[in-house]
Amino acid sequence: MYLNVYVPRLQIVEGVLGFIRQHRGHQIASTRMVEPITRQFVAAIEKYVGDHGIPLVCFDKGQRKEEVAAQYRATFSESEGVVFVGKAQEKCRVYRTEKRRNPHTGKSYAWIVKSTALVNHYYFYCVDRDFGPFFLKFCSYFPYNAKLCLNGHEYLKRQLEQQGIAYEPLDNGILSCQDPQRLQALADGLSAEKIDGLLRKWVRLLPHPFSVLDREAGYRYDLSILQIELSLTQVLDRPRTGRIFFEEVIRENLDIGRPKQVQLIFQRRVRKETPGLFRTRVITDGVVPSLHVDYKGTRIKQYHKEGRALRTETTINNT
């Protein structure tokens, strides 16, 4: 899951004006009034990293962040904590102040508008006792929106270990489990409340851009889904048969991306004006082929995973 972490009241210009003028008490409605918050937030991150001896990694352009994270996690022995902090410049939505002129009096005045800018983002790569590896990415510029990325399979692995249930992992999944019914119950138990609890726990532990008074006034982070990936992993008793079956699936479904075929899968009528891509692609990575079907903001990917299981992944980008 990839989640938006944001302060709802600060996602519109009127809310920003209220924060600067009514809440913070500034007479001038300008983003210059929040620059001290930005400086304090960045200084708090640098102090936190220095005080705890946490590596600070500046990501290079185009560098695969997950590969860097995997290297650091391999040497991290604690059950919980911050593995490292990554820093990268990325484009995001921000607020800026522009000068406007009153058409009647000719006087200029400041006005806040939405814009985009290339600013520093700080990635906190952490390990949680209950959720396993995850990262929390903060924008260092007002209104300090963030992203939370977590993996449900890693959550399951931690829960199984805590309950002493033996299992065999399958990369990003479970190959076998001593108690499959309990495994399914644990998967069903991953609720919105538990995910929200993960966020609340770590924003208390990590540097926070908003003061206690800000949070008491209602300027608190909330969560929404940006992207969710759901998977079905069907482990096969005879893996070779599974590969033969999947090759037949590809041959039989090369036309599945056509609107009438996609309609059968998603149960949505496709008209001429329906936006999005309608296509099927067969992509080969090495010797492993995969079947990809696109529909609006959703993608289905199916492939033969590690020669052991039929894997179907559905990724939704427009919740």
Image (cartoon, rainbow, N blue to C red):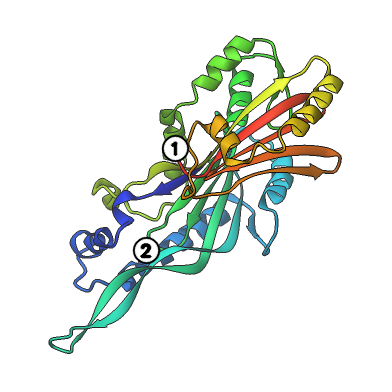
Residue 176 to residue 214: above or below = above
User: Do we see residue 148 in this rendering?
Assistant: yes
Residue type at mark 2: give it.
Ile
Q: Identify the residue position indicated by label 2 in the image.
A: 37
User: Do we see residue 75 in this rendering?
Assistant: no
Q: Identify the residue position indicated by label 1 in the image.
A: 201
Identify the element where label 1 is drawn. Answer: helix
The residue sitting at 70% across, 21% down in the picture is 234
Residue 3 in percent (x, y) is at 48, 43
Marks 1,2: beta carbons within 8 A: no
The residue sitting at 57% across, 30% down in the picture is 152
Of label 1 and label 2, which has the lower sequence position? 2
Q: Horizontally, is 135 left or right of 193 in the view?
A: right
Specify few, some or many for label 2: CA neighbours under 10 Å numbering under 14, 14-19, or 20 or more. Answer: some
The residue sitting at 64% across, 45% down in the picture is 279
Q: Horizontally, is 84 left or right of 2 in the view?
A: right
